[in-house]
Amino acid sequence: MKTFKLVGLKIERKDREGRIEELPLADGLIINKEDGENSWLIEALLSKRYRYYFEHVLQNKAELRLFVTITKKNNTPAQIIAKVRSIMTLEEHISVLLEGRMFTLRSAKVDAEKILHDLVAKGLTGKELLDSFKKKMYRQPD
């Protein structure tokens, strides 16, 4: 296993129309489990104001799309699909442990196919289909 400093964390908030929200980190680390499955563990020390959100995600066993910045703020964020494993309340913060897999080209292909299928099912065609697909497929974190 290899451990790295977590310097940035953004999440896709499904409860807010998929908006990307940057979470202010008090501290954090990310561990490459090196298990051949591209598995990662993330520990984020966050404000207590996020406690109820992460408790809700944990209770629903929901997946989160994370954009994690490792080691240096100017590094390109990596995408990880993760689940909350535990939440620990500390004096001034919460510690959230997440486990997930790095978002790979293969999973991006699956996402693209799902997005396209959903848009075609809505009856979109031509330029409207292309514009909607690009908007959904290539949205980037702020």
Image (cartoon, helix red, strand yellow):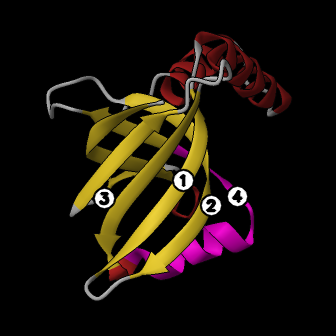
Pair 2/3: label in front? 2
Q: Residues within 10 Å of mark 1 (few under 14, many from 20)?
A: many
Q: In terms of secondary structure, where does tag 1 sit?
A: strand
Work out whether 34 lies above or below 84.
Answer: above
Which residue appears at 74% of the width and 19% of the height? Answer: 110
Q: CA distance from mark 2 to mark 4?
A: 11 Å
Q: CA distance from mark 2 to mark 3?
A: 18 Å
Q: Which residue is labeled 2 in the image?
A: 85
Residue lying farthest to the right in this orientation = 121
Type of amino acid at the residue the image marks with label 2:
Arg
Q: Which residue is labeled 1 in the image?
A: 98
Sequence-wise first label, 2 or 4: 4
Q: CA distance from mark 1 to mark 4?
A: 11 Å
Sequence-wise first label, 1 or 2: 2
Q: In terms of secondary structure, where does tag 4 sit?
A: loop
Q: Residues within 10 Å of mark 4 (few under 14, many from 20)?
A: few
Q: Position of residue 63 (x, y in %)?
A: 66, 50
Type of amino acid at the residue the image marks with label 3:
Leu
Which residue appears at 21% of the width and 24% of the height? Answer: 75
Q: CA distance from mark 1 to mark 2?
A: 5 Å
Work out whether 51 lies above or below 14.
Answer: below
Type of amino acid at the residue the image marks with label 1:
Leu
Q: In terms of secondary structure, where does tag 3 sit?
A: loop
Q: CA distance from mark 4 to mark 3?
A: 18 Å
Q: Which residue is labeled 3 in the image?
A: 23
| Left or right, 28 with reference to 40 | left
Residue lying farthest to the bottom in this orientation = 91
Q: Residues within 10 Å of mark 2 (few under 14, many from 20)?
A: some
Q: Main secondary structure of the magenta part?
A: helix
For residue 12, which numbered disc appears in the image?
none
Pair 1/3: label in front? 1
- 16, 53: nearer the viewer: 53
